[in-house]
Image: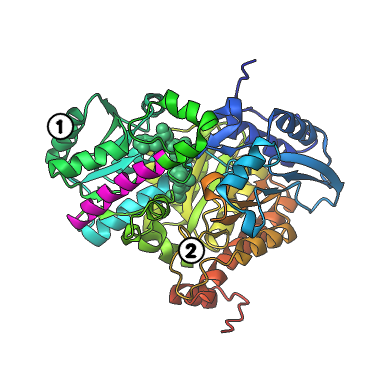
């Protein structure tokens, strides 16, 4: 039976309190905006909201009946039980896809998944924090703007960005490129994904052929106009074709699901039907075909880099896969975190977001207005909020992302809680963040690559973060590790806190949000970053600085 995926509106509660109702609406939301909800898949090829439908239904039933002094325990998307705790404890705690070190490999994951024993929650899928493509859009936009500052005198007008992948996260790329003022070409193997991004307003045009796509890009470039063009094709064919034609874009990246050789990447020369069939019947051959294709794909990226393009890895493990396929210099391509965003993470400035549980866009507009008034000197925030409210269509529950840091995140959350209390907002607001955040992620090939002190692979930080968030009264706390192709590559912590207008919510927001960002600053201070050490001092954090 085909299920319908809708978000719930209004102020009527189906649960015993707003905290439980909020988490239920967030679970509904990740399916409503997810890529393949019939299979509970939200994004990144295999990132699931729950283990299976029985687990999903039991979670929903529990959220509807559980009391405020209880905690629901979830293990890899399956509810295990409810324990009696107290009204200041998290309502939901989850551990998703954490395998013991030597066993944390893609093959072991697939086997456990086939046996129904594990599922991967991605970052925000399993923790019900996904908000559609907007969740990653400011990160992509800030990367493009940082490249503009570093390489192109502050402007991407007349510049050509080449990328690939229009999935759950990759779908943000065309809009981020346009917001940054560039002409952006996105290669995508699945025509349905192109259609979806055209429909939801993230992509402006689709081209039938490479020639047509290049003509559109060239015309926009010549006029200095922003434009996004989708092209149905395989990146491992199109990138080398541009190399062969001697065309060098200004900026090159990729956001195909290259992290997963079976369920993510589409090898060149194969139809989507054949790939779907091989996933079940010939997974080993599919892995080999994906690797061979990624090799060509990354070799073309390296050639474009040698010819002068600014090339970066946007967090999909494509360099790691290419290296294992024999591309010895794959890591000549830098990772976006180290190249562009680390100074922000040092001050715990990262992908903070909030969702309007009323399902009313006016609530987000009210918070946008507050931000513009409250932070007049934050130029990046002012620019972002103005661009976002003009350009970003909402998907599912209206939501906003903004890269705020330590103290500012708490200031906003407490002000919003007051607005819920006095009725300026129609219903509570859920606060969350991406797991790719200062204290929250150890991922030596993405988030923590080349840290100053070499602590890239130490996963103590996200574990400490999650335990601290439980002690700080957050409503939902999750510890995730990588699944599929990410198996063994990462561990992260997720958090959600509900601003329901009560004094208890104010306390939860103050503790959980402040402590989360404080630990983020301390993590980078501990790794030796001056910016973080200065921030720890100016914020009077109780940080020991022992080395
Ligand atoms: P997704 O699975 O929803 O979409 C991937 C898309 O790539 C699909 O539409 C697929 O058809 C397309 N594709 C696969 N192989 C292709 C090829 N060879 N040529 C052209 N198109 C191809 O995944 P997503 O959620 O969009 O995430 C994409 C990648 O980005 C993942 O590896 C994910 O882990 C990573 N990611 C990075 C960040 C970040 O912060 N930078 C955030 C989220 C996700």
Q: Which residues are magenta?
A: 289-308
Check disc 1: other Cα within 10 Å, few if <14, some if 14-19, many if 20+: few
Could you say whether the residue bearing mark 1 is in a helix, strand or loop?
A: helix
Does the magenta segment cover residue 493? no
Residue placed under numbered mark 2 in the picture: 448
Residue placed under numbered mark 1 in the picture: 215
- Dividing the image into four quarters, tell me where ligand 1 lies: top left
| Lower position in the chain sequence, tag 2 or tag 1 | 1
Quarter of the image holding residue 25? top right
Would you place residue 54 above or below residue 117 in this image?
A: above
Left or right: 140 with respect to 415?
A: left
Q: Kindly give the residue lying farthest to the right in the view shown.
A: 84
Quadrant where the C terminus is found in the figure? bottom right
Does the magenta segment cover residue 290? yes
Relative to the observer, which residue lies in front, 434 or 194?
194
Q: Position of residue 337 (x, y in %)?
A: 41, 59
Relative to the observer, which residue lies in front, 514 or 48?
48
Q: Residue at x 73, y 39 (%)?
A: 78
Relative to the observer, which residue lies in front, 30 or 497?
30
Q: Position of residue 221 (x, y in %)?
A: 16, 40
One can see residue 368 in this view: no
Could you say whether the residue bearing mark 2 is in a helix, strand or loop?
A: loop
């Amino acid at each position: 039976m085909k299920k319908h995926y809708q978000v719930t509106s209004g102020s009527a509660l189906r649960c015993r309190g707003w905290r439980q109702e909020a988490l239920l609406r967030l679970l509904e939301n990740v399916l409503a905006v997810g890529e393949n909800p019939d299979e509970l898949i939200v994004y990144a090829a295999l990132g699931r909201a729950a283990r299976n439908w029985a687990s999903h239904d039991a979670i929903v039933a529990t959220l509807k009946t559980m009391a405020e002094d209880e905690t629901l325990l979830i293990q890899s998307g399956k509810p295990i039980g409810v324990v009696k705790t107290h009204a200041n404890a998290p309502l939901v705690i989850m551990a998703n896809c954490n395998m013991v070190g030597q066993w944390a490999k893609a093959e072991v994951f697939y086997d456990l998944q086939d046996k129904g024993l594990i599922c991967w929650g991605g970052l925000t899928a399993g923790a019900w924090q996904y908000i559609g493509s907007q969740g990653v859009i400011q990160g992509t936009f800030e990367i493009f703007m940082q490249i503009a500052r570093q390489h192109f005198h502050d402007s991407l007008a007349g510049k050509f960005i080449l990328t690939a992948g229009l999935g759950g996260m990759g779908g943000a790329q065309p809009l981020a490129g346009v917001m940054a003022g560039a002409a952006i070409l996105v290669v995508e193997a699945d025509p349905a994904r192109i259609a979806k991004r055209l429909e939801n307003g993230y992509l402006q045009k689709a081209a039938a052929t490479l020639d047509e796509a290049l003509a559109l890009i060239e015309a926009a470039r010549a006029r200095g106009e922003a434009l996004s063009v989708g092209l149905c094709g395989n990146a491992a064919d199109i990138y080398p074709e541009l190399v062969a034609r001697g065309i060098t874009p200004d900026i090159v990246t990729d956001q195909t699901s290259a992290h997963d050789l079976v369920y993510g990447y589409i090898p060149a020369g194969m139809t989507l039907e054949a790939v779907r069939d091989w996933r079940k019947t010939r997974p080993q051959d599919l892995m080999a075909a994906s690797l061979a294709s990624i090799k060509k794909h990354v070799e073309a990226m390296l050639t474009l880099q040698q010819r002068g393009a600014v090339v970066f890895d946007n967090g999909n493990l494509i360099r790691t896969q290419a290296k294992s396929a024999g591309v010895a210099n794959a890591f000549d391509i830098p990772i976006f975190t180290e190249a562009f965003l680390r100074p922000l993470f040092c001050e715990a400035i990262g992908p903070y977001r909030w969702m309007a549980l009323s399902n009313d866009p006016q609530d987000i507009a009210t918070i946008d207005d507050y931000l513009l008034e409250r932070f007049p000197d934050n130029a990046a925030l002012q620019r972002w909020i103005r661009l976002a409210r003009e350009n970003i269509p909402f998907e599912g529950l209206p939501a906003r992302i903004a890269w705020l840091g330590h103290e500012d995140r708490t200031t906003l959350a407490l002000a919003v809680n007051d607005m819920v209390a006095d009725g300026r907002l129609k219903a509570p607001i859920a606060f969350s963040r991406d797991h790719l955040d200062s204290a929250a992620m150890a991922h030596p090939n993405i988030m923590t690559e080349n840290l100053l002190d070499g602590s890239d692979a130490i996963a103590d930080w996200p574990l400490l973060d999650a335990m601290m968030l439980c002690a700080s009264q957050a409503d939902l706390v999750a510890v995730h590790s990588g699944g599929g192709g990410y198996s063994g590559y990462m561990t992260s912590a997720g958090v959600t806190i509900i601003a329901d207008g009560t004094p208890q919510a104010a306390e939860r927001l103050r503790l959980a949000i402040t402590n989360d960002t404080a630990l983020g600053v301390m993590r980078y201070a501990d790794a030796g970053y001056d910016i973080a050490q200065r921030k720890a001092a100016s914020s009077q954090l109780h940080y020991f600085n022992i080395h």
